[in-house]
Amino acid sequence: MAAAHKEEVIGKLNARVVRGSNLVIADPLTHTSDPYVVLCYGSQKVKTSVQKKNSNPVWNEVLQLSVTNPTKPVKLEVFDEDKFTADDSMGVAEFNVTDIYDAAKLDLKHVSDGARIKTIYPVGVNYLGAESHVSWKNGKVVQDITLKLTKADSGLIVLQLEWVHVPGVTL
């Protein structure tokens, strides 16, 4: 087999980074942080804008990732922007695309709008800070996720995921 096999894109994930809450104070001088969120999936890396001096930032920005392997998790990290030194990490988390992917494979044409397809509970090894729901909204499969940051004393990040079908790809 050729080693240069390009991973096939099976769908796109629109990840709306809604907000952060109770993020750590990364800058002790100003007692604030200038946070932004980075999502990594494979070799892809996308990030939000910086919210100046805000430990409860609202981004409401959509970052898009191309999904090649539904079992590969998306890694999330929050950073504090520093002008003169390297940006400090303010916590990490990750989430799986398996739940939204499994729902995207279903035939949901006859499902009523707003119906819950699946609930994922914050137990075991996941980073959930609250129940996560995969739903059918406006003809799209969406998932609300609240992630608890690790490697930090506090902090939650709220995301809304939306599966985007790629033309010609059958799940």
Image (cartoon, helix red, strand yellow):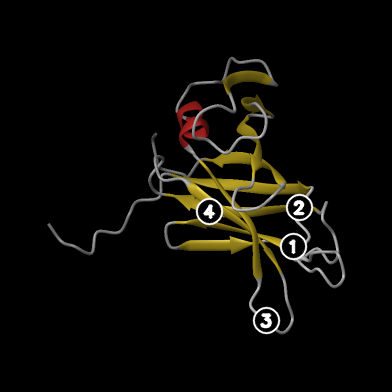
- Are the residues flagged by discs 3 and 1 in contact, CB closer than 8 Å? no
Residue 156, quarter of picture: top right
Up-down relation of residue 5 to residue 109 (above or below) = below
Q: Which of 169 and 56 is in front in this view?
A: 56
**At which x and y percent is residue 30?**
87, 70
Q: Name the residue under label 1.
A: 35
- For badge 4, the amino acid type reads Leu
Residue 137, quarter of picture: top right
Q: Residue at x 67, y 30 (%)?
A: 130
Q: Gap between marks 3 and 2, in whole Å?
A: 20 Å
Q: Which residue is drawn at 63% across and 25% down?
A: 135
Comes first in the chain, label 3 or label 2:
2
Q: Residues within 10 Å of mark 3 (few under 14, many from 20)?
A: few
- Considering every residue shown, the one lying at the far bottom of the view is 84
Q: Gap between marks 3 and 1, in whole Å?
A: 15 Å
- For badge 1, the amino acid type reads Pro
Comes first in the chain, label 3 or label 1:
1
